[in-house]
Amino acid sequence: MAGLRETLETKGKKKISVHVNEIRTNKLNQYPMDDIEELALQFLEMEEQIQPGEAYEDELQDGKRFTLTSGERRYRAIKLLYSRGEHDGMMDLIIVNKPQDIWEERRRIRAANVYRTHSQETRWMEIKECEEEYQHLIEIEQKPKGLKRDWIAAQLGISGRTVDRYLKDPKAPNSETAEQKKEDEKDTLHLQSCAQRLESKFQTKTTIKGHRINIYFQDTEDLNRILELMDALDQGVSEC
């Protein structure tokens, strides 16, 4: 069959190698396609095989055979290299069943992007997709139990409070993250101040690791000196 180089079964799913000219992108995929040039360069430098994408077979009027549900950035990088004559244009795909409807297809695309770092705009897009699906479930009398925000949060692996913030004001900053960052900065400044005071009092080196301050000593005599300054030296023992 044209465009196929190898076929095998992987964990019960068909894995094939397909030319990029036989692959189409998914119009439902709204995730940003950034850093394609950098990804293409990584592929040139990699010795191991590129992780397969995921697609379903669907022959439309465009002459292509497969629609991606995962791996569009990889597809774009390979296609870029192929256009330069630096790649043979073949991409490994795991072939899955065609989604039953738009909601299943969107869920597959979101699942494929779950480990990416999302911008505020991307997170808002995901929440709106889930909100549309929630409304669809109501319309077909399959309304999920519980609050809408909690159902959406469960779909995306985020908190209900985060969903609430976006639904009320999608342009508002992520206040939970901002507040946590402010608290972390405050803790760091406090620890640095404490470490400097300890160094001055004990005349020794200190370091900070996480929420811990390490106080260093050179030998037992130096340790006893520090303990004495701390008023922590056991009075019944002359030295440690």
Image (cartoon, rainbow, N blue to C red):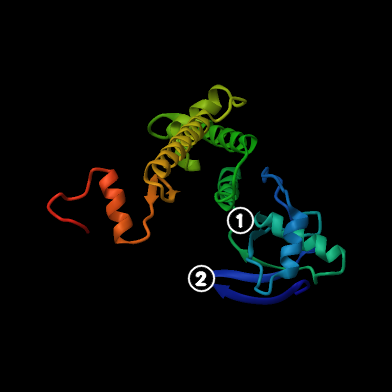
Asked whether 166 or 228 is in front, the reply is: 228
Q: Is residue 141 visible?
A: no
Asked whether 198 or 209 is in front, the reply is: 198
Residue that mark 1 sits on? 98
Residue type at numbered disc 1: Lys
Residue 181 position in % (x across, y down): 51, 35
Residue that mark 2 sits on? 11
Residue 130 position in % (x across, y down): 54, 36
Left or right: where 2 falls relative to 163: right
Residue at the spot 15% in from the left edge and 55% down from the top edge: 237
In the rendered view, would you say 30 is above or below 80?
A: above
Number of marks in the rendered image: 2
Q: Secondary structure at mark 1?
A: loop
Residues under labels 1 and 2: Cα distance? 18 Å
- Which quadrant of the structure image shows residue 61? bottom right
Asked whether 224 or 52 is in front, the reply is: 224
